[in-house]
Image: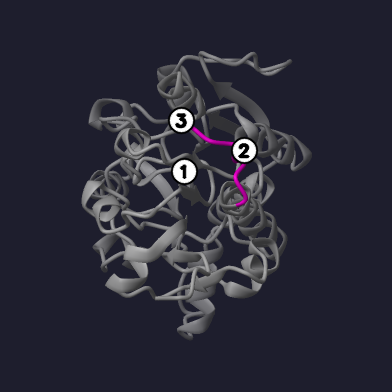
Amino acid sequence: MNGGQPVVVGLGPVDPALVTEWLGDDVRLVTDPSAADLAEAQGAIVRAAYVVDRAALDAMPALKVIARTGVGVERVDVAAATERGIPVAITPGSNARAVAEGAITLAAALVKRVPQEHRLVSTGQWGTAPIPTPGDLLGSCLGVVGYGRIGRIVAQLGQALGFEVSVHDPYIQADDLPNRSLAELVAESDVLTLHVPETDRPLLDRDLLWSAKPGQVLINCSRAGLVDIDLLDEALEAGVLGGVGLDVFASEPAPHHPVFDRDNVLVSPHVTGLSVAASEATFRMAAQAVAAVLAGGRPEFAVNAAELVDASR
């Protein structure tokens, strides 16, 4: 027992230096919790691929609040949390700029054929093998799927680099940008970048992917389930796609996949949203949400806030 000191557990990698100040001195943070720690936990900060299902909730009977870094809650059983009266807080906007920069960075590197050029030099083939010809950003079509916080910044950065930007979002007005159907955007984009929530089926199936503009670069810094990694590998092998950049995976840490070995592929460990500034903002918001509930209040951004209010009536 901890003498009445509230316990907050980190589920997934949580840096104490980024949250302790906001949780307060009277809270005990445990980043590698035992079963006993989980049983006492009143708050949980959840990140990366950690799954909070019914079994996980059963292991935390004292839990009062879940704070999920970022905005995705597909790995949290929100319905089960709501049944228990537990708010599920998110941190909207905290890492939008960082993710957008990451997506554009992957796109630019692949268009410019940086991986191939690096391998040519690093393996001593400069002078003996053909030099890859870099592509151009200026005048290329950047297709942005999803025009929310991240998609808007991606579009702005793309325009600043000279891309002709089009979007697909049936729910949001895209300002002065062309808003295409998904099929149109896939067919016309030199670079296609995904910034939408995951659903119960892939966004891009075989028929849609094989209709892509030849040589298209596909970027996914959103959700792994939007497009199957095996299908991406097939599309690269068939020459349907010219490059792929991935920051998200179905299982994390990701087991090795043959697509990782291709010289027109760039992968990163789900880190685009964790720049220095974004990490500070994300964990601050998560810790503040936990602290608010432990102090008897409510988190500012809870995905199940309305359901909890209805249940209390």
Please report whichever mark, 2 or 1, sits nearer to the chain's N-terminal start: 2
- Compared across the picture, whether 24 is left or right of 87 comes to right
Cβ–Cβ under 8 Å for marks 2 and 1: yes
Prevailing secondary structure of the magenta residues: loop
Camera-side residue: 100 or 83? 83
Image mark for residue 304: 3
The number of callouts visible is 3
Give yes or no for residue 299 being in the magenta stretch.
yes
Image mark for residue 70: none
Q: Which residue is mark 1?
A: 222
* Position in image of residue 208 (x %, y %): 31, 26
Q: Residue at x 46, y 69 (%)?
A: 13
Residue 202 higher or lower than 215, as above or below = above
Name the mark nearer the viewer: 3 or 1: 3
Give yes or no for residue 204 being in the magenta stretch.
no
Helix, strand, or loop for circle 1?
Answer: loop
Amino acid type of disc 1?
Ser
Q: Is disc 2 surrounded by few (<14), some (14 to 19) or many (20+) residues within 10 Å?
A: many
Magenta segment boundaries in residue numbering: 295-304
Q: Residue at x 72, y 41 (%)?
A: 157
Q: Residue at x 31, y 72 (%)?
A: 36
Amino acid type of disc 2?
Ile
Instruction: Give the distance between the C-alpha atoms of the residues marked 2 and 3, in whole angstroms.
Output: 22 Å
- Compared across the picture, whether 239 is left or right of 3 comes to left
